Image (cartoon, rainbow, N blue to C red):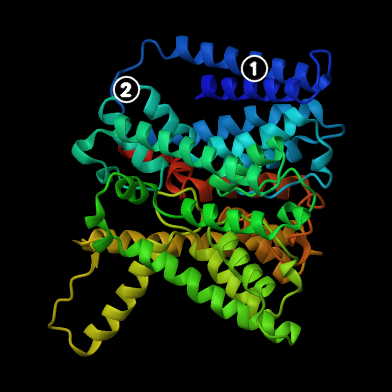
Amino acid sequence: MLLAISGAFALCIFAGLANGETIADKSIQSFIITIVVALTISIAFHFLGKQGQDKLFRREALCAIGLSWILATIVGALPYQLIVEDCSFADAIFESSSGLTTTGATAFPKFYEFPHSLLFWRSLSQWFGGLGVVVLFVALLSSLGAGAKILFSNESSGASSDFDHGRIQSGAFTLMLFYVGITVACTFSYKLGGMDWFQAINHAMTTVATGGFSTEPASLEEFASPAIEWISIVFMALCGTTFIFMIRLLRGQTHILKQNNEVYWYYAIIAFSSALLTLYLVELTGELPSHESVRAAIFQCVSIMTTTGYSSTDFDQWLPPAKMLLIMLMIIGGCSGSTGGGVKVVRVVIAARAAFRSIVQSFRPSITIPMRMGGRVLSERAIQSAIIFLMLMAILQVFSMLFVSAIEPELSFLGTFSCVQATLFNIGPGFDAVGPTQNFNFLHSYTKLFLSLLMILGRLELYAVLVLFAPSVWKRFS
């Protein structure tokens, strides 16, 4: 993983040199130092682990995933620390975590003044984290054997059983090719839409990763281009869809159109929310629906639900019902097996169906009602797992709000809620003090570090990080 990040830093040097920076510049020298540090740690770990066992079990896999992301965040923070003047450790960690977890929140008010190499790293870190450094790791190292299946299924928010015959390395490599392909398509689309090459490449990486980092101070609103917004809508929606679903469609496996309930629910929610938000905007402006209002509604619904976090307008100024709708979309997020964040559509659908089934069985206790998803009957364990995950996220949000409010007493309730929700669900912008035109720079260092941890928790869906703080796992199951 550290070797892969070193390669990413090398690409940042190339991007900087291609855009006018020189070897003598502080930015390029800082990236060279960072590469040396990453390679040194990588070599040290290689020799320390030479005598280790070849087998990788579930516990070790979870530990490897959690520690990999924490280590990647620390190493990824070095360029900010070395390049940005007066950059605190907390700001560097926050920005690095926000990039690698594809959250898109920023601690730098004037990030657009960064040298091109560092701007490129902001975008590349999101692209790198979108599919997941561990998935890249699995795709490139076939020697992991059965351990690769555990790594993939825990990191990618998708079931490893989605790949035929259990060939996880091959499946992860296919995902990588698709990911690169859709990034290239997005890049050319943005270029045709009016961006220059540097803007197109950066925005393509953060669109496909559903991360939302931009090179411009006002995000996509800066371009004032309906074409660019529609391009962004299409690619954000696609990248919030289960990647394996799209790959199988491209292979001609049209029978899956009859099976994947989650994708249908995903697009149905986007369509319904966009229509409802359009009505709210009509009420706000007092004008009939226009192309601008419809586009703004669809853009913001897709951006928020996929947790990309791009903004085409200051939605913090919208009516309370519109804000409530966006908050609900933030929680739901994209499909499982996509780059989107949130709790995932599939879990929300399962929980809603389980609640309905419970109501029916309350007055008809003798009947058995099987639940299906994607053409398969769900086990009670799968249903229970989805509900418990939602409960854990809700509990974590409440306690995180208590922690943040203790450190930031001047924040309003909505501001505190948004700080936690925007980071835990990997969204980026929130409301009030952390709205789409604001940033997280004003927060205390402890708050930024805590929110950075929340980003990693949300990106890895809790367990791979929580296991690091559960000593009983290591004592009882040794």
Residue drawn at x 14%, y 76% is 368
SS at badge 2: helix
The vertical placement of 447 against 187, above or below, is below
Residue drawn at x 57%, y 16% is 41
Q: Which residue is mark 1?
A: 35
SS at badge 1: helix
Q: Quadrant of residue 167?
A: top left
Inspect the image, locate mark 2, and give the three-letter code of the amino acid beneath it.
Answer: Ser
- Count of numbered marks: 2
Residue drawn at x 59%, y 20% is 6
Q: CA distance from mark 1 to mark 2?
A: 25 Å
| Residue 350 position in % (x across, y down) | 33, 67
The vertical placement of 394 against 204, above or below, is below
Q: Which residue is mark 2?
A: 142
Q: Residues within 10 Å of mark 1 (few under 14, many from 20)?
A: many
Whether residue 397 is visible here, answered yes or no, is: yes
